Image: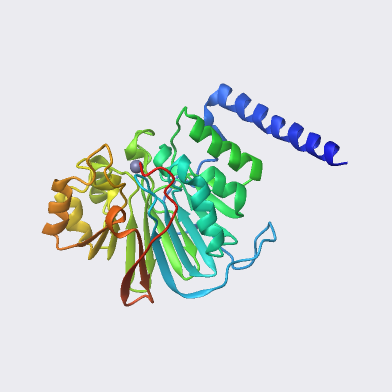
């Protein structure tokens, strides 16, 4: 019986792969991801997380009474875990080499279900570990930009989405969804953004009580200017510094509009890119942001009750390569 069962699983897997390849050959891998339902940005939710009502029947994690945002130390990559109540969201999943450590970390933390997973853009240092997360932990919905990439890493992610049947959305600026008592709003990419490279990055604002976070992926100066022109930028308490502190992002105009009190740079020690750039550090100092870095501080935890902000640090063993 075991042999018949594994044969069935193998055939199912092959069928999924065949379907994936057929679709990608016909019209590009991105077509697997359904477009956002409405072409007009509205404040209406595109998805609402419902406590304890997971179609998979998986239990939720034990509730916490504050919002916790962890900028995980995944080396030269991004991965951010957001928790509130019994809800959880993962923004990016580190490099491919971080997958095992990331899944173990989430499971050890008791993350039994992720309401939302976000792949900011298809680069390996952001989506590398997401296929393993999707395979190991029930996920309510995955959010991806209208972007594509002809890489094995991206194909692995699409295959994991298809295999698990996870609803996928390409959100547009103005779309928003609830994460417990917090609200996540999409600021970028715009419909006119070139669907490749760093400027394809999903940019998300998270509001909880009077406090706010801005998650930027690797969005560069063009996206920053577009958000500013569209009137989407407001002040935010905590900024995930874009593109690991590269000079391609964090223009003075953008930082002046966001005016972050805290800025977190997700960056690998001794990386090949020279991230973060001194110019970016100077620009952050100019707006009087307190800067934390995963290469020096480890995992950065920002906690808030909606009024007060507290910062602490954790040592984690997630980074699989240090790159
Ligand atoms: Zn990156």
User: In terms of image quadrants, where is residue 320?
Assistant: top left
Question: Quadrant of the image for the N terminus?
Answer: top right
Q: Is residue 7 left or right of residue 265?
A: right
Could you say which is closer to the camera, residue 173 or residue 306?
A: 306
Residue 159 is situated, as x and y percent measured from the top left of the image, at 59, 36
Tell which residue pokes out farthest to the right in this image: 1
Q: Where ligand 1 lies, by quadrant?
A: top left
Q: Is residue 8 left or right of residue 268?
A: right
Q: Is residue 234 visible?
A: no
* Residue at x-position 50% and y-position 46%: 99
Count how many numbered circles sit on residues in the image.
0
Residue 78 is situated, as x and y percent measured from the top left of the image, at 38, 49
* Residue at x-position 30% and y-position 52%: 295
Could you say which is closer to the camera, residue 169 or residue 103?
A: 103
Residue 196 is situated, as x and y percent measured from the top left of the image, at 37, 33
* Residue at x-position 56% and y-position 65%: 110
């Amino acid at each position: 019986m075991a042999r018949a069962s594994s044969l069935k699983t193998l055939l199912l897997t092959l069928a999924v792969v065949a379907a994936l390849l057929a679709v990608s050959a016909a019209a590009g891998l991105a077509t697997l991801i359904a477009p956002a339902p409405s072409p007009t940005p509205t404040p209406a939710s595109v998805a609402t997380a419902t406590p304890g009502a997971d179609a998979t029947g998986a239990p939720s994690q034990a509730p916490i009474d504050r919002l916790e945002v962890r900028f995980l130390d995944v080396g030269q990559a991004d991965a951010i875990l957001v928790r509130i109540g019994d809800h959880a969201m993962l923004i990016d999943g580190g490099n491919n080499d971080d997958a095992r450590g990331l899944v173990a970390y989430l499971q050890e933390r008791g993350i039994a279900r992720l309401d939302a997973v976000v792949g900011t853009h298809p680069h390996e240092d952001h989506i590398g570990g997401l296929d393993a997360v999707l395979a190991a932990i029930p996920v309510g919905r995955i959010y991806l930009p209208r972007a594509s990439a002809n890489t094995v890493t991206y194909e692995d992610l699409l295959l994991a989405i298809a295999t698990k049947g996870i609803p996928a959305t390409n959100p547009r600026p103005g779309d928003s969804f609830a994460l417990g008592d917090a609200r996540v709003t999409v600021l970028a990419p715009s419909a006119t953004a070139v669907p490749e490279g760093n400027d394809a990055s999903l940019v998300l604002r998270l509001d909880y009580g009077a406090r706010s976070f801005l998650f930027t992926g690797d969005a560069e100066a063009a996206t920053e200017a577009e958000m500013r022109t569209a009137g989407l930028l407001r002040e935010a308490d905590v900024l995930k510094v874009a593109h690991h502190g590269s000079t391609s992002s964090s223009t003075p105009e953008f930082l002046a509009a966001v005016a972050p009190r805290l800025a977190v740079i997700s960056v690998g020690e001794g990386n090949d890119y020279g991230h973060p750039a001194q110019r970016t550090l100077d620009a952050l100092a100019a707006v009087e942001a307190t800067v934390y870095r995963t290469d020096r501080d480890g995992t950065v935890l920002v906690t808030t009750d909606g009024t007060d902000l507290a910062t602490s640090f954790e040592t984690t063993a997630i980074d699989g390569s240090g790159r």
